[in-house]
Image (spheres, coloured by chain):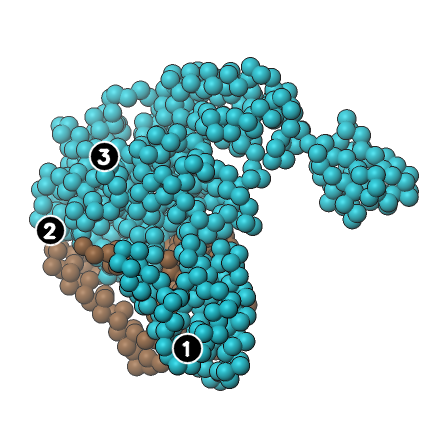
Chain colours: A brown, B cyan
Amino acid sequence: MGKVKTLDDLRKLKDELKSKTSLRDKSEHPESMVQIKVAMATCCIASGSRETINYLADELEKRNIEAVVTQTGCMGYCYAEPTIEVTLPGKEPIIFGYVDEKKADEIIEKYIRNGELVEGIIPMNYKNIEDTTK
Amino acid sequence: MSEYKIHALVCGGTGCRASESDKVIENLQTEIQKQGLSDFAQVIKTGCFGFCEKGPIVKLIPDNTFYTQVKPGDAREIVEEHIVKGRKVERLLYTAPDSDEKVSDSKSMNFYKKQIRIALRNCGIINPEDIGEYIARDGYEALGKVITSMTPEGAIKLIKDSGLRGRGGGGFPTGLKWELTRKVESDVKYVVCNADEGDPGAFMDRSILEGDPHTVLEAMAINGYCTGASHGLIYIRAEYPLAIERLKIAIKQAREFGFLGDNIFGTDFCFDVEMRYGAGAFVCGEETALIHSMEGNRGEPTLKPPFPSVEGYLKKPTNVNNVETYANIPVIINKGAEWFAAIGTEKSKGTKVFALAGKVNNVGLIEVPMGITLREVIFEIGGGIKEGKKFKAVQTGGPSGGCLVEKDLDTPIDYDNLIAAGSMMGSGGMIIMDEDDCMVDVAKYFLDFTVEESCGKCAPCRIGNKRLYELLDKITKGNGEQADIDRLINLGNVIKDTSLCGLGQSSPNPVLSTIRNFGHEYEAHIFDKKCPSGVCKALMIYEIVEENCVGCTACARACPVGAITGERKEVHKIDPTLCIKCGACEDRCKFNAVIVK
């Protein structure tokens, strides 16, 4: 990757990166592409999120589910760690709390495979800057 | 396997459970079964919606209908009308407070969401180790905009107009600080990020650095351009290893992309960032002490003036800002000063990140607009007090702040109101206490912390705080006397007036504010030799209730100091002079024969 020399370069790069993520959404198998984010700040890791992310990555592969598992920062729901956000193709992201290996297994089998919700959903209770009007 | 078409999400937060949400779930399930819809609709218990005031909450998806104050008896109507016939139950819909209109789609009811995430905008959303995800969310756009199309003065004016104030606790206007550093002429200037977060229970800055490290780098570069500095330093405590690791990755990536280094965005502007590690001393959050620590000297504060903006790191003009302050900068540049200034109160603009801790249900990291009340924070977002206990006090500002009580709950939170109420904003730690907390013990805890963390340079803080601690210790041990309260107040005020830096000037606050709000608890300790909350062990007396004791000897065997005597099948007795109040006997007794007085 070369250096970004102008603001236009940056904006071009931004558009590319944005479409890259949306391409990921519209991949050839939209029905099977799942995105999972695992909160991985110190507090989350202390509550076991590293075990959760490893478990998810291993198990999804073993069970032949095409998914992208990434780490992210603190979602703020420290009382319910480990927390993960699951986005099924074409659906709103859903956040689950208290995701240990057992819960992760349930989420894979019920929600990811069958679209059936499981307990432990954390409702999003904040506005992001995109939601506020200028 | 069938796929459910409708999901009913029912809030299982403590607030909603207290108003029978469990029963609502049960009834919904029964009704769904009765209608033979078990394969069609599913009821799911969720975490707290942060809208406890209107609980229990039931949300139906996919159409996002948001029902409030649902009673167990409403389950049938929801199932028959909404799930079977697809008609919304009008009377349960939420009425918008401003327009009196029924709101059915929760997508348009953002207003119940009391949090606005500005500083935390990317936390929990992007992968902090991937600069691409930051760029895809407008990352480095503000930096590009500032250095290619704005003058330093213009950018400083924008920050000033936004009304942003320092988020580290002091609340000094950020734009003004930048301007002061800019105006000093010097060949070399420094920009510093204060990531020495030291308040007990506070983790706002750590979370930002771990979740969105690039925002700090971007804002530091903007700061460098505005103040005329080309060196940036991040002072971070070594006990934040993950934050350090992610910052290192971020710095490396930013250099590869040319956002740090020479000729950024093809201009003459050059800026790079280095890290400096602290050993975790609380006083090093004070900017002069922080600078001395970075220079390799002892982390001790010096008198201001000269202010760091005139004479700081290596005697050069230095602009020190806190992590959260930096995290606001790119958004202010991108969205404009007016946008930012529209959020918050007259004198405190924007949002503040708080770390909710203590006896609150939803412990966590929150970001709320200035002007929100403590009641909304604790009872809505925080979901109320654990186990339905009674709220007693909330400590804001950490060991430098004070406690706020019931009567302060409706005070809008901003820098000035919190000071007027006898506490302070501080860096954002918020520790919530319930009826089981002893306020003398709380004051002692914070004093213990400040005594430990005092650098020892000035006498009032070094000796005075130690004496304050000893007085509190004496009171909690049952040896307090009448004059001690006045001694605490007098000494506390002297320490505040005469200490060198912010640590000493604020360390007596927990003592003074607890005396002010909970004088009766001090009196109970001193005159009645009782701890009303049952926390101070020295004041507790363990006794055996004769009628309940069966003489099983379990307590005597559990007692580590042999304070319990008695033969088998006979009533036992505790010798109060030997008892160390460990509570082992109480835990062991199966007959409720051991009581605490």
CA–CA distance in space, label 3 to label 2: 31 Å
Query: Label 2 neighbourhood size at 10 Å, few (<14), some (14-19), many (20+)?
Result: some
Q: Quadrant of residue B57?
A: bottom left
Residue A30, compared with residue B11, is above or below; it is below
Q: Secondary structure at mark 1?
A: helix
Q: Quadrant of residue B138?
A: bottom left
Residue B139: percent from left, percent from top: 23, 55
Q: Earlier in the sequence, mark 3 or mark 2?
A: 3
Q: Secondary structure at mark 2?
A: helix
Residue B109: percent from left, percent from top: 31, 61
Q: Secondary structure at mark 3?
A: loop
Instruction: Name the one closer to the observer, B321 or A5.
Output: B321
* Mark 1 residue type: Glu
State which chain disc 3 sits on: B
Q: Earlier in the sequence, mark 3 or mark 1?
A: 1
Q: Which residue is mark 1?
A: B81
Label 2 vs label 1, nearer the camera: 1
Residue A108: percent from left, percent from top: 47, 73
Left or right of A6? Residue A66 is right
Please report contact status of discs 3 and 2: CB closer than 8 Å, yes or no. Answer: no
Instruction: Name the one closer to the observer, A19 or B202.
Output: B202
Q: Which residue is mark 2?
A: B266
